[in-house]
Amino acid sequence: MKIILASDHGGFELKEQIKFYLTEKGIDFEDMGTHSNASVDYPAMAKRAVPKVLANKNNFGVFVCGSGIGISIMANRYKGIRAALVHSEIYAQLSRSHNDANVLCLGGRFLTFEEAKTIVDVFLETPFMGAQHVARVKALDS
């Protein structure tokens, strides 16, 4: 598993904290930017990161913008991406178990680092349930 990180300026600080956390946990990641808090557009950051997520079925994305909304909308424009804007542990669990989400989107201006850590952990540790959810997930790309 490799985590592909991306953010705009509104999510930069939280992304940097998540990088440190992933390093502490020994989780492999690649940071696709941005690399400062200078203004940058979230569509460009998502476009840069999505191909890396799609390159390997074991990859996950963690994308952060100010609200999480814009970067999730952009990511979901790509076939094969199931980006979920997550605000809580239960959303993280459901996005993985029911929707097989492969990109976690977070709002850098709305979550504390402690909240984000828990959400990231739940997202990465929750398996897809399969069963009746398989057909629903396949329909997302049809």
Image: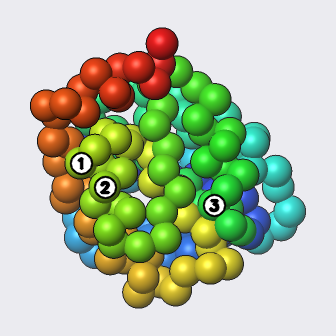
| In contact (CB < 8 Å): disc 1 and disc 2 | yes
Q: Position of residue 109 (x, y in %)?
A: 67, 78
Residue 67's image quarter? bottom right
Can you identify the residue that label 1 sits on? 97
Q: Position of residue 43 (x, y in %)?
A: 75, 42
| In contact (CB < 8 Å): disc 1 and disc 3 | no
Please tell me whether residue 141 is drawn above or below residue 35 in the rendered image: above
Q: Nearer the viewer, residue 112 or 1?
A: 112
Q: Position of residue 79 (x, y in %)?
A: 52, 21
Q: Nearer the viewer, residue 16 or 117?
A: 117
- On the picture, is 122 further left or further right than 40? left
The residue under the point 41% across, 86% down is 114
Q: Quadrant of the N terminus?
A: top left
Q: What's the amino acid at mark 2?
A: Leu
Residue sticking out furthest to the front: 132
The answer for how far apart the CA atoms under marks 1 and 3 are is 20 Å
- On the picture, is 136 further left or further right than 108? left
The answer for how far apart the CA atoms under marks 3 and 2 are is 17 Å
Can you identify the residue that label 3 sits on? 68
The residue under the point 20% across, 55% down is 126
Q: What's the amino acid at mark 1?
A: Ser
Can you identify the residue that label 2 sits on? 94
The residue under the point 41% across, 73% down is 88
Determine the secondary structure under disc 2. Answer: helix
